[in-house]
Amino acid sequence: MTTQYIACANMKGGVAKTTTTITLAESLAAIFSKKVLVIDLDTQSNATSCLVGMGATKALRTADVTIDQYFSALPGQTDTKSLEGFHINREVTLKKPVKINGKTEHVVYTIQCSNIDFEKNKSSGFVSLIPASSRLHGTERNMLDGTIGTYGGFNGYRDYLKQIILTDLENLVAYKDADGAEHGYDFIIFDMPPGISLFAEVFLSLSHKVIIPNIPDELSLSGLEDFRVLLKANAIFSNDEIRDKTFILPTKWQPIAPHKNMISTIAGQEEKYGQFLKARRNGNIILDQQKNPVPFCIKQHAAIPMSTQAVLQNGRAVPKSTLLHKVTKQDFETRYLFKKKMTFREKYGNASPNLIELAKYFIEPSYMD
């Protein structure tokens, strides 16, 4: 199976791009034993936090293993680095300074991607991550300021970066560790930032499919057509590619008249707004976003972190009295490393069937006929 590159993108923020990224990645890995890499390209780092926890996200930034460090080292910047040095292949071990009995000790802990129990799911798949950080936006600005003129303007620099990053992605797909074990990926999912930027254009142009999560309301609809126009105007996709590669996924859907009416409006003007993402088998529509959208509740489940520090504990705020400067080593290991794992269905509940059908769309060709 050739590795598929999938982008979750939209001009508008808050439409569940990250939710779609996480749920699709975990569906593919847990249910279909696929090896999935999530690349977080949003300066908010929400996909990173959803997969490893907010505390671990800060630790990864401190350790300089976030994607902005990769971009900073691309040709035309400082020295080159490979994407392999920035991906968490299921887990990574870091040291964290902790005050224990008045002394600073470095506690070694492991950051794991996803709180799905893949073993209980009888899955040989996994989710890996290339994390983002809040420095990403500044890195992009510096790259544009420092080198864009050398490559014939914005489009020339974008296409130049595209070729370099494509080569690095292909090397990552064929990645082997020091013992010679293969760690290639079946799917690489890009969690895109809102709007259109240099990085967004590069990774959109690399994508085989683009999922456009969209809330069925007036504000979201107004940006849907503009997004498709920009894909063409900025020479990211041709008309045929826009038709064949982009799919609308209604999100945060609720069974209320305005949402139902808006979905009917989009369905009646696919040439203008784009086609719904639908899954078919033997000519029958199995997942029909017009009648059976992915429900609103998956947003809550996608945000359950794997590991947190002084922010969340089993979904609740951690009392100030238990912050890091007042904990023991045992406290740190049990309280701040959120180790609880769950099966796919335990995590996603009633949303599971829809999410499984969504994943099937990208696996079985008969679903796309």
Image (cartoon, rainbow, N blue to C red):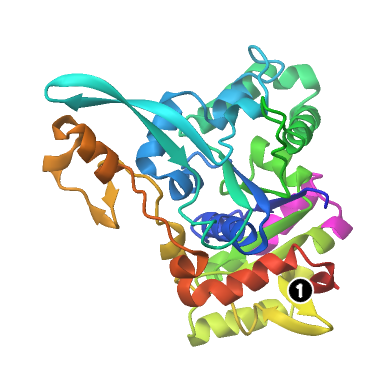
The kind of residue tagged 1 is Glu
Disc 1 crowd rating (10 Å Cα; few below 14, some 14-19, many 20+) is few
Q: On the rendered structure, is 293 left or right of 297?
A: right
* Closest to the observer, 258 or 114: 114
Instruction: Give the position of the C terminus as an image quadrant.
Output: bottom right
Task: Specify whether residue 141 is in view.
Answer: no
Magenta region? 224-241
Q: Residue at x 56, y 65 (%)?
A: 220
Residue 74 vs 132, above or below: the answer is above
The quadrant holding residue 82 is: top right
Q: Is residue 152 covered in magenta?
A: no
**Residue 84 screen position, x and y as percent:** 65, 28
Residue 13 vs 73, above or below: the answer is below
Task: Specify whether residue 261 is in view.
Answer: yes
**Label tally:** 1
SS at mark 1? Answer: helix
Q: On the rendered structure, is 252 left or right of 263?
A: left
**Residue 53 screen position, x and y as percent:** 40, 45
Q: Residue at x 55, y 63 (%)?
A: 121
* Closest to the observer, 85 or 250: 85
* Closest to the observer, 117 or 192: 117
**Residue 72 screen position, x and y as percent:** 60, 21
**Residue 299 screen position, x and y as percent:** 45, 64
Magenta: main secondary structure equals helix
Q: On the rendered structure, is 124 left or right of 175?
A: left
The quadrant holding residue 326 is: top left
Q: Residue at x 74, y 30 (%)?
A: 168
Q: Is residue 234 covered in magenta?
A: yes
- Name the residue beneath numbered marker 1: 270
Q: On the rendered structure, is 134 left or right of 241?
A: left
